[in-house]
Amino acid sequence: MRSHQNYGKITDMAIPSTSDTAARVAKGEPYSFSFHYLSEDVVRYINALFAKILAGMDQIFLLDTFITIIREICINAVKANAKRVYFRTIGISIDDAESYPEGIEMFKKNVIGHFETMEAGLKNSDYRVSFSMKRDQNGLVIQVLNNSIIRPEEMARISMRMEKARHYEDFSEAYEEIYDDTEGAGLGIVLTVLLLKNSGIGVENYKIIRGEKDTRTLLVIPFELRPQEITTRIKKQILAEVDGIPTFPKNVLELQRLCANPDSSIGEISEKITIDPALSTDVLKLANSAGFISGKRIETIPEAIKNIGLKNLNAILLATSARSILDKRYTRFEQIWAHCNHVAFYARGIAIKFKLARMVENAFLAGLLHDLGKIIMLSTDLGTTNKIADIVKDRKIRTSTVMEEISVGISHANIGEMLAGKWGFPDYLVEAIRCHHTPLNAVEKHRDIVFTVYLANIMCGIESRRYQLYYAEDEVLARFALSSDAAFNELHAELKTAYDTRVE
């Protein structure tokens, strides 16, 4: 394959347009680039490039899974090079069997968990990672090559992990059995194999080859996927839980019908609301909130309905009923609801900022209900959920969704989608819940609201240190003219100030 620029330090050079590159790859042209260190700029470039390539292959739904796989492959390649640079630094030959255990212990102690300390050494070394791809008749062929020769012992350990991983049903099972502290956890290869199985790409399309002067990882993304259904005990339990959750109570369903009927009177609607103290409180609270200030305090339900309108009343019906049902059935998850309120506030602010007037309150409601599925997942198996959160954080995976799918067999976004469908939520709301971690999967009709909730969720995640800005989809940032870090940070700061100074 032909060689292109070194993207080890993308910010110091012209970056090829990802759209142009994707178009060339689609025509069958080979493309390659190289880097010394997997910096945030390299990760963002790979994410943006493959968002375009997979969209062109009509496989955008694979994006998060694919990016997780590619990141693991690239990390392994850079880590192999870093090990050799480190051994050279401490004066130990990596091929010396007697000194190797001492060197690897020092590597684990001083580098693992502090990998950024190797950035300068890698960039000043002759070790690099070459990333190349070419589309052929079978699919997209990707090669990640690092110019260090893998040791026989390392190759044996990798082969063992790959073989074992083929037989696991879910990641929890693998985590308990295969954890290897010899040179690191060894979970990256297991994670990759399970993702390949679950996505339909297939384990047979993933190979690690020991060459005479290098180590190559080959990955083929076929045009025809062969999905494999993974049904775990936890997934069966979750599906049973969703099936057993009650529908909205009759008075709420009747109120929704009245809100949808233009001939309904405010008196008739008010009478039904007054029957439910919790609903009455929520209606009055919203009517007196900063978003609906009318110059005087609202104290009656009829006044409140006039002030907020039937559309916003229907939103309250959805939100209050959903929370009431889940709080009665499960432990109260105040932290999740607090996060949802935060996202809802930001989503509404983003919609106002970008003059999306017709969807301001819809964005607020979508933010308020986007994590419904997480409550059910936490209630069903808190241990697995906590383990997923730790792995996502440790390995800097962009979203918990892919880990949920291989650990449990279903993501919290899909659980929320099922519940929203059961409760008869409007299409825009179902789509926002389904795609709040995978916005590029959203249908065009609902992309504005999905992108708005996604962006609000990213900002809240950055504040809680779960996300970093480079996790965000470039296409979403571009849609809101936030492609520069400065523009994003300015909007984020503006929304955060408004949230911190809000009047309850």
Image (spheres, grey):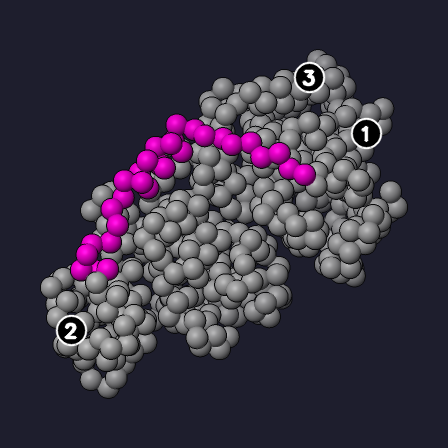
Mark number for residue 214? 1
Residue, far bottom: 295
Instruction: Please tell me which residue is depicted at 49% across the width and 30% down the height of the picture.
Output: 230
For residue 283, what is the image quadrant?
bottom left
Residue type, numbered disc 2: Glu
At numbered mark 2, what does the secondary structure look like: helix, strand or loop?
Answer: helix
Mark number for residue 268? 2
Whether 171 is among the magenta residues is: no
Residue 34 appears left or right of 434: right
Circles 3 and 2, Cβ within 8 Å, touching? The answer is no
For residue 66, what is the image quadrant?
top right
Q: Nearer the viewer, mark 2 or mark 1?
A: 2
Q: Which residues are magenta?
A: 224-253
Residue type, numbered disc 1: Asp
Instruction: Please tell me which residue is depicted at 87% across the width and 42% down the height of the picture.
Output: 1
For residue 105, what is the image quadrant?
top right
The percent coordinates of residue 118 (x first, y second) are: 67, 40
- Mark nearer the N terminus (2 vs 1): 1
> How far apart are the two marked residues, 2 and 1, measured between alpha carbons?
77 Å
Number of residues whose C-alpha sits closer than 10 Å to that of mark 2, classed few (under 14), some (14–19) or many (20 or more): few
> How far apart are the two marked residues, 3 and 1, measured between alpha carbons?
16 Å
Instruction: Please tell me which residue is depicted at 33% across the width and 45% down the height of the picture.
Output: 375
Tell me if residue 83 can be seen: no
In front: 296, or 485? 296
Residue 499 appears left or right of 274: right
The percent coordinates of residue 359 (x first, y second) are: 43, 71
At numbered mark 3, what does the secondary structure look like: helix, strand or loop?
Answer: helix
Tell me if residue 315 can be seen: yes
Number of residues whose C-alpha sits closer than 10 Å to that of mark 1, classed few (under 14), some (14–19) or many (20 or more): few
Residue type, numbered disc 3: Ala
Mark number for residue 156? 3
